[in-house]
Amino acid sequence: METCCVKALVTGKVQGVWYRRATQERALQYGVTGHARNLPDGRVEVLLCGGPDAVKAVSEWLWKGPEKARVTHVELEVIEMHNPDDFRTL
């Protein structure tokens, strides 16, 4: 199975609104592994690894996020393959 990894930096009102947990739930629905972590500057860093279609679907969802989030920008970068065995919030 072909896999890919993408790192996303999500900007906006994304901390304190269940963004990481909602991202984890969405990733698990698509069988995507990785992590979501709050950064000191208020952004959320997301690592997504899995099948290209699944990673694309979750990446597109990052622009929406959970109901209380207000995403203003998502910066995506394709990165070298990682092999996380699950999806974690850090």
Image (tube, rainbow, N blue to C red):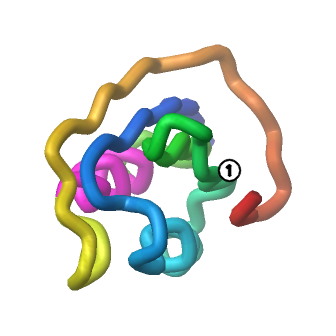
Q: Residue furthest front?
A: 41
| Residue 60, horizontal then vertical, whole percent | 23, 51
Q: Is residue 54 above or below residue 23?
A: above
Tell me the kind of residue under disc 1: Gly
Please give left or right for residue 7 compared with residue 69 in the image: right
Image quadrant holding the N terminus, namely top right
Instruction: Name the chief secondary structure element in magenta.
Output: helix
Please give left or right for residue 61 compared with residue 50 in the image: left
Q: Identify which residue is drawn at 31% across, 27% down.
A: 75
Q: Is residue 1 above or below residue 80?
A: below
| Residue 25, horizontal then vertical, whole percent | 52, 80
Q: Identify which residue is drawn at 57% across, 17% down.
A: 79
Q: Secondary structure at mark 1?
A: strand
Let me know if residue 2 appears in the view: no
Image quadrant holding the C terminus, namely bottom right
Please report the bounds of the magenta region as a residue range.
54-63
Residue carrying label 1: 34
Q: Nearer the viewer, residue 8 or 84?
A: 8
Q: Nearer the viewer, residue 48 or 37?
A: 37
Question: Badge 1: how crowded within 10 Å, few (<14), some, or many (20+)?
Answer: many
Q: Is residue 77 magenta?
A: no
| Residue 82, horizontal then vertical, whole percent | 76, 31
Q: Is residue 37 above or below residue 22?
A: above
Q: Identify which residue is drawn at 42% across, 40% down.
A: 52
| Residue 66, horizontal then vertical, whole percent | 30, 78
Please give left or right for residue 53 compared with residue 23 in the image: left
Let me know if residue 88 appears in the view: yes
Q: Nearer the viewer, residue 40 or 60?
A: 40
Q: How many marks?
A: 1
Q: Nearer the viewer, residue 85 or 41?
A: 41
Q: Identify which residue is drawn at 42% across, 19% down.
A: 77
